[in-house]
Amino acid sequence: MNQESQDRVDDPAITRLEHNGKQIVLIGTAHVSRDSAALVRRTIAAEKPDTVCVELCASRYQALRDQAGWQNMDIVKVVREKKALLLLANLMLAAFQRRIAHRLDIRPGEEMLQAVAAAEEIGAVVHLADRDIRVTLARTWRAMRWRDKLKLIPQLLFSMGEAERITEAEVERLKQQDMLEAVLSELGESMPRVRETLIDERDRYLCEKIRSAPGDKIVAVVGAGHVPGIRRHWHDSVDLPALERMPPARRWTQGFKWGLPLLIVAVLVYGFTRGGLHTGTEMVYLWIAANAALAGLGALAALAHPFTILSSMAAAPLTSLNPMIAAGWVSGLVEAFSRKPRVIDFENLARDILSLRGFWRNKVTRVLLVVVFTNIGSSVGTFVALPMMIKLM
């Protein structure tokens, strides 16, 4: 038996591929599995590759290496740049993974950290192969229908509760499924666009990044759910720039965004001109009451500061008529300044997202919840008020 066969690691989680003379050892892992972490280190030590590819983007890699990175986040900037929901969804996904890892006493992403450490020990190049998580979440959000967006946060919250009941044996079965897919498995049936951007697009992206990585021998560490897709696309042409671009907003979405406020204004004008002062005034009262009450209720559900609740009630009737501003952005900024997150809130963020109670207790995540819940309340208020106003015509 030659040395190469002696050093070769055989495991059901390993797939061996070739591309333009390169040897690729593809390891499918569970992201919170001790066995996966051990397999990764053992394989890299035995194979001695030129390059180790990991299923990480630069921001996720930095987050794994720098656990204190949350302390540098500017929550006001997040709200102003309209990224509150994306960050909240990202934190909930991270929470699901962290809760499983916490139960099993292992760091989330341990197999990726082991891959990086093993690569550094043998002097191999570390190649980040995944698409930026912000691009993935933004593309997913852009592709979703509005009713699917309303399902997202409750589904993520529910998934956090499910994490408490997952055993170590079940984690090993997660090797057959990507972590993001596991969290959103129920939504995947009714929301194929979510699967397309979270799983299928990343299969193609990972495939191309692994094939184009430097070196003649490559070990690639990816979630097991991506392995079938990578193999399926292995001989296909992949357009990376297309997968990194933000898709253009749909025309009907832009039309609805501007058309709904114009419709509401038209209804109010019609009420005053055809129904008289009494009818028009009653329509205005209905509009203000529905928007203010439900936006305030949303802020209250997030346990917002009293000033924040009042600001959401004051802003909602006006922001609902302006497509460029949302009531949640106003209330989120007020909450951020009324209860400014302290250093300890950022330090405790990784721990607090392990529980639903922690999401409401931590001042950072509470700001995000205020933004999301106020916007939901204001949107519901709009659709409650409009038919009631039309009935008065």
Image (spheres, helix red, strand yellow):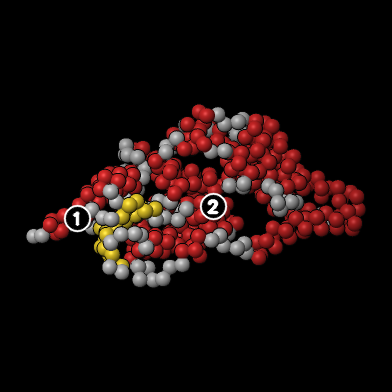
Tell me the residue that label 1 is attached to: 9
**SS for tag 1?**
loop
Q: Is residue 160 above or below residue 18?
A: above
Q: Tell me the residue at 40%/51% (across/down).
A: 56
Residue 92 tag number: none
Quarter placement of the N terminus: bottom left
Percent from the top left, x then y, of residue 263? Answer: 77, 59
- Left or right position of 25 against 327: left
Instruction: State the residue position of label 2.
Output: 151
Q: Nearer the viewer, residue 276 or 29?
A: 29
The answer to whether any part of residue 331 appears in the image is yes
Image height of 1 relative to 108, above or below: below
Q: Earlier in the sequence, mark 2 or mark 1?
A: 1
* Label 2, label 1: how far apart the Cα atoms are: 43 Å
The picture quadrant where one finds residue 75 is top right
Residue 242: give x, y in percent of width and height: 50, 65
Label 2 crowd (10 A; few <14 / some 14-19 / many >=20): few
Mark 1 is surrounded, within 10 Å at the Cα level, by few (under 14), some (14 to 19) or many (20 or more) other residues, namely some
Q: Nearer the viewer, residue 177 or 334?
A: 334
Q: Is residue 162 visible?
A: no
Residue situated furthest bottom in the rendering: 236
In what element is the residue under mark 2?
helix
Q: Quadrant of residue 390?
A: bottom right
Q: For this view, does 19 lie left or right of residue 294?
A: left
| Lateral position of residue 97 relative to residue 371, left or right | left
Instruction: Tell me which amino acid carries mark 2.
Output: Lys
The mark closer to the camera, 2 or 1, is 1
